[in-house]
Image (cartoon, rainbow, N blue to C red):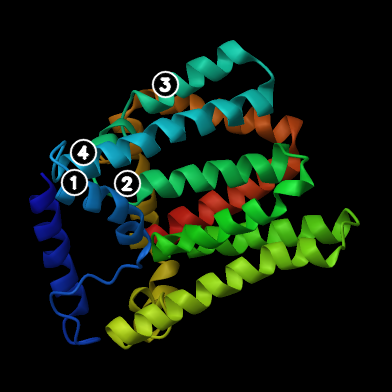
Amino acid sequence: DFELQVDQANAVCNEFMSGRFGLRGRSVRPFGLPVLLSPAYLWGRHMPWPGLPHSLYLWIGLFYVWLGVEFFRLIQAATNRPRLAWFGTLAAMLLPPLAPYAFQVYPEIPAAVLILRLFRREFYGDNDRERFTDGLCLACIPMFHQKYMFLFVMSGLHLLSGVFFHRRKQILDWLALIVPGALSLIALSVFFGQRFDIWLPTAPYSVQGSLLKNLFTLHTLKVIGAQFLDRKWGLIMVCPLLVFTFSGIIALWRRRPWVWLWWFTTCGGFIVLLS
């Protein structure tokens, strides 16, 4: 129920922002999802079929299909086994927690498309002519939500280190990665400054040093465990098939330690910050 989700989000925003930034009743989110949905919104508003909100659901559904394609391409590039790629893609796309997002207007699906494509290009791609596309994908990720900022930083550092250490020091390679990312951060800062009087997009989530204060506490450790084992929302409880992820982590560590290190650092930091 889209309206119910909006009401719940507003309630959480009211409780969290009250007395801190004077943002009662205003959801502090970037502009990525509204911009992405604008073609579907105009289509549903001015065309007789399918109308609103069905045009939004169809639009998100297209990105859901694109996400499946990116899953397949990533697994195929990593294993070179088409059958395994089909099985992994179907298991990921047709089971919770990912499948329900195909029917909800959230930024996770389009952001996941960019993240998977960028991950495949970082570790399994060799076409330098797509360097500008890599920079564009990287720049768009934080536009969907501030929680992707850590992944944005880690991926940006890895891409820049690849340009430096592999002797691809052409000025165009540097510009293709730095310029889109810099413009993205500037746009986010200006948007938050004009809309919410907050020039640092991540400020609401680290107010008065609360982020560092609560980072290394027993409560945070409990929440990290709940991300996987909570009876209602835990990933493994929702989809027990994800238990096999741990065997995949071990296999990745044995075959490609550098990829495992990046994956573990990025995903681990992401989960810790969410918790």
User: Mark 2: which secondary structure?
Assistant: helix
Q: Where is residue 200 in the image (x, y as percent from the top left)?
A: 43, 82
Q: What is the spatial separation of the Cα atoms under label 1 and label 4, in whole angstroms?
A: 35 Å
Q: Earlier in the sequence, mark 3 or mark 1?
A: 1
Q: What residue does disc 3 label?
A: 91
User: Mark 3: which secondary structure?
Assistant: helix
Frontmost of labels 1 and 2 is 1
Label number found at residue 44: 1
Identify whether 85 is placed above or below 269: above
Side (left or right) of 199 relative to 259: left
Residue at (63% x, 31% y) in the render: 250
Q: What residue does disc 4 label?
A: 232
Badge 1: residue crowd in 10 Å (few <14, some 14–19, many ≥20): some
Q: What is the spatial separation of the Cα atoms under label 3 and label 4, in whole angstroms?
A: 20 Å
Q: What is the spatial separation of the Cα atoms under label 3 and label 1, in whole angstroms?
A: 32 Å
Label number found at residue 226: 2
Q: What residue type is labelled 4?
A: Lys
Q: What is the spatial separation of the Cα atoms under label 2 and label 3, in whole angstroms?
A: 23 Å
Identify whether 198 is placed above or below 130: below
Residue at (52% x, 47% y) in the render: 115
Q: Which residue lies furthest to the top in this view?
A: 83
2 and 3 marks in contact (CB < 8 Å) = no
Q: Earlier in the sequence, mark 3 or mark 4?
A: 3
Badge 2: residue crowd in 10 Å (few <14, some 14–19, many ≥20): some
